Image (cartoon, rainbow, N blue to C red):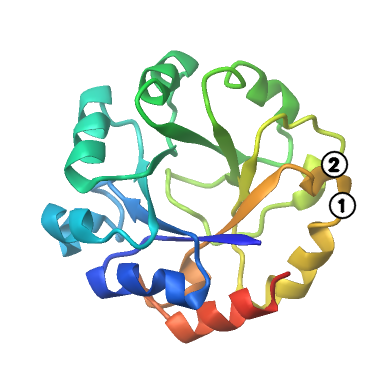
Amino acid sequence: MRIKVCGITQEEQLKQLSAVGATFGGLIFYPKSLRYALRHMTVEQIKKVNNINKVGVFVNATVEEVLQTVDNCRLDMVQLHGDETPKYCEKIADYISVIKAFRVSETDNIGWRLQEYMSVCDMFMFDTEGVGYGGTGKKFNREMLSGVNIGKPYFLSGGIEPEDAADLNEFAIKPEARSLFAIDINSKFELMPGIKDMNLIKGFTDHLK
């Protein structure tokens, strides 16, 4: 199972991700976030790391800002975590692979929300609805994906913690996990905001199938 570790703020930890079983490193380019990458690292530091797939996370940024950051930091993918429209996503997707994140509430019709993004994004991400645009640390109700024709590879996010490995292995064999592409982890694997517990991540990835 692929793992994305989001909210990386240290060059050394970005370099270490592949060694602890991660496939993707998430770098947040949202100035209001505690894990805003450019508050802790320079563009040059990010740019020179090339042993992990770097995913830039943006929230309602301009198209120009996203594309410039992609080039300057040599990002491999872009995750759009705000209120980006399908037209906006299409402009970004013409240049680089796009993951559109959806913050889902218990009353949402996921299938309906996905429809207009289906042709303009490469992948989706499902996270728990909360105040603001950051992760909530709250569990995403995976049962909401049951019976939904997702139609794209997707990242599963939302309060995933070290103790969830067995549950995720069980979920991975369900029909709704057929398009599951990767697991997204963040705050439950930290010593403090932006500083990851690499041993905890390694233990988690070792237990995933």
Answer above or below: position of 156 versus 193. Answer: above
Q: Residue at x 46, y 33 (%)?
A: 98
Asked whether, in this view, residue 71 is left or right of residue 103, the answer is left
Callout 2 amino acid: Ser
Residue with the mark numbered 1? 174
* Tag 2–tag 1 contact (CB < 8 Å): yes
Q: Quarter-wise, where is residue 104 in the image? A: top right
Q: Earlier in the sequence, mark 2 or mark 1?
A: 2
Callout 1 amino acid: Lys
Is residue 103 visible in this depiction of the protein?
Answer: yes
Q: Residue at x 37, y 18 (%)?
A: 91
Asked whether, in this view, residue 138 is left or right of residue 48, the answer is right
Q: Residue at x 71, y 21 (%)?
A: 112
Badge 2: how crowded within 10 Å, few (<14), some, or many (20+)? few
Give the image location of residue 67, x and y in percent.
25, 30
Give the image location of residue 87, x and y in percent.
44, 13
Q: Nearer the viewer, residue 75 or 34?
A: 75
Q: CA distance from mark 2 to mark 1?
A: 9 Å
Is residue 109 visible in this depiction of the protein?
Answer: no
Answer above or below: position of 12 versus 86. Answer: below
Answer above or below: position of 83 versus 46. Answer: above
Q: Quarter-wise, where is residue 102 in the image? A: top right
